[in-house]
Amino acid sequence: MKIGIRGLTALVILPVILGVWPAIGQAANTVYVGASYGLYKSTDAGATWTMVDIPLNNALLKGPVAVTSLSMDPHDSSKIYCIGNAIARAFFATTDAGKTWSATPFVAMYGRDVGVDFAGQVIYITATASAGSGDNLLYKTTNAGATWTRLKIPNSTNAPSSGYPNG
């Protein structure tokens, strides 16, 4: 199924199908899909796919990258960001459409989702203190993940405050 929003086309895929997780697209033809066994790119609206090589430039990371969250700069489709597992959980970034990548393992947090603001200037991630933690955390970066700033999330009256003590 494809969905078009403001000139962008996103391919919607259920996580249960073939271990495929997030999907994003730019224009009508280029689509990136993250899977439990790597990142894939199609330049013909999904007719054919090639695997995107994400080199692991950190001793804490090895094996294939299982991409669990994926986002793209809305103004520059060559800037792609994802969260994935390669033995350790990490943030991956490219500014040249996947030719080169940076990989930064998460320390003292478990990154879950990644998003880019509409201006393409700030990258946000949601995280928890650990894989099973109930503490919801929000971080932002303005330098493609070189440094992160934790943002305060107010407790909600709809959720028990004990479930979000560090919000």
Image (cartoon, rainbow, N blue to C red):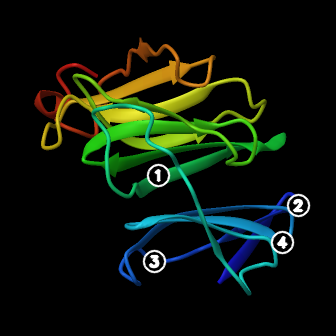
Dot 4 or dot 3, earlier in sequence: 3
User: Viewed as shown, does residue 161 lie left or right of 19?
Assistant: left
Label 3 crowd (10 A; few <14 / some 14-19 / many >=20): few
User: Viewed as shown, does residue 39 lie left or right of 83?
Assistant: right
Alpha-carbon span between mark 3 and mark 2: 22 Å
Could you say whether the residue bearing mark 3 is in a helix, strand or loop? loop
Alpha-carbon span between mark 4 and mark 1: 20 Å
Foreground mark, 4 or 3, reads 4
Q: Which one is in front, 4 or 27?
A: 27
* As drawn, 70 above or below 37: above
Q: Which residue is mark 2?
A: 7
Dot 2 or dot 4, earlier in sequence: 2
Alpha-carbon span between mark 4 and mark 3: 20 Å
The kind of residue tagged 3 is: Leu
Could you say whether the residue bearing mark 2 is in a helix, strand or loop? loop
* As drawn, 38 above or below 93: below
Foreground mark, 2 or 1, reads 1
Q: Which residue is mark 4?
A: 29
Label 2 crowd (10 A; few <14 / some 14-19 / many >=20): few
Q: Which residue is mark 1?
A: 69
Q: Which residue is mark 3?
A: 14
